[in-house]
Image: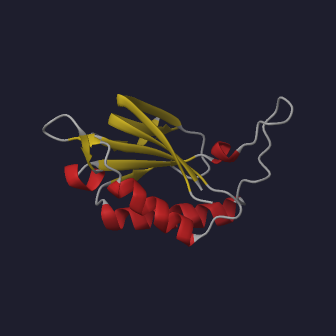
């Protein structure tokens, strides 16, 4: 499981021009699911996303978590994160999870994150999406659990 995490002032995702998920201050999580991932991976990364201390405290130091600031999360499925570009000029997606399995694990991850962060929005699994954001910092991290 791989997550590109971005601290945002706001983010939104659209499908066919209509907004389906939108947040203010919080985290945009682009989530890729590997064919060998499982619920333990999702548990670990959901906990990490909710508790990672990357928001500024009163001294301006990154010392507060998403849970601490009562921020929101926008989770967008993105199988291309699992793409392998080491050979040739076209990415290989053979390590990406099957869409049926990936959707179940995606929904499981979202559910686990909602146990930590009450305001979790999502894109539409498998849809062509347009993602807009204002990266705050910028702060962008890559989280993986294999």
Q: Nearer the viewer, residue 101 or 48?
A: 48
Q: Can you tell which quarter of the image residue 26 is in?
A: top left
Above or below — where is 48 with respect to 64? below
Location of residue 125 in the rendering, given as x and y in whole percent from the top left corner:
57, 53
Location of residue 80 in the rendering, given as x and y in whole percent from the top left corner:
66, 42
Assign the N terminus to one quadrant of the image: bottom right
Location of residue 82 in the rendering, given as x and y in whole percent from the top left corner:
68, 47
Relative to 3, 21 lies left or right: left
Name which residue lies at 62% across and 50% down: 126
Above or below — where is 83 with respect to 132? below
Q: Residue furthest bottom?
A: 39
Q: Residue furthest left?
A: 58
Name which residue lies at 77% across and 36% down: 85
Name which residue lies at 59% across and 46% down: 78
Q: Can you tell which quarter of the image residue 84 is in?
A: top right
Assign the C terminus to one quadrant of the image: bottom right
Relative to 121, 33 lies left or right: right
Location of residue 43 in the rendering, given as x and y in whole percent from the top left corner:
47, 68
Q: How many marks?
A: 0
Relative to 95, 71 lies left or right: left
Image coloring type: secondary structure
Above or below — where is 15 with respect to 105? above
Name which residue lies at 32% across and 64% down: 116
Q: Nearer the viewer, residue 66 or 9?
A: 66
Relative to 88, 106 lies left or right: left
């Amino acid at each position: 499981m791989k997550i590109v995490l971005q601290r945002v002032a706001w983010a939104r995702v659209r499908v066919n021009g209509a907004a389906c998920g939108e947040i203010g201050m919080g985290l945009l999580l682009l989530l890729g699911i590997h064919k060998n991932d499982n619920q333990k991976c999702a548990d670990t990364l959901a906990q990490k996303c909710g508790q990672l201390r990357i928001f500024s405290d009163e001294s301006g130091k990154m010392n507060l978590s998403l849970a601490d600031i009562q921020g929101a999360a926008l989770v967008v499925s993105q199988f291309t994160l699992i793409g392998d570009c080491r050979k040739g000029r076209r990415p290989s997606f053979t390590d990406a999870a099957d869409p049926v399995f990936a959707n179940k694990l995606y929904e499981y991850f979202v559910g686990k994150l909602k146990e930590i962060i009450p305001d979790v929005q999502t894109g539409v699994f498998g849809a062509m999406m347009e993602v807009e954001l204002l990266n705050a910092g910028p702060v962008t991290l890559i989280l993986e659990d294999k």
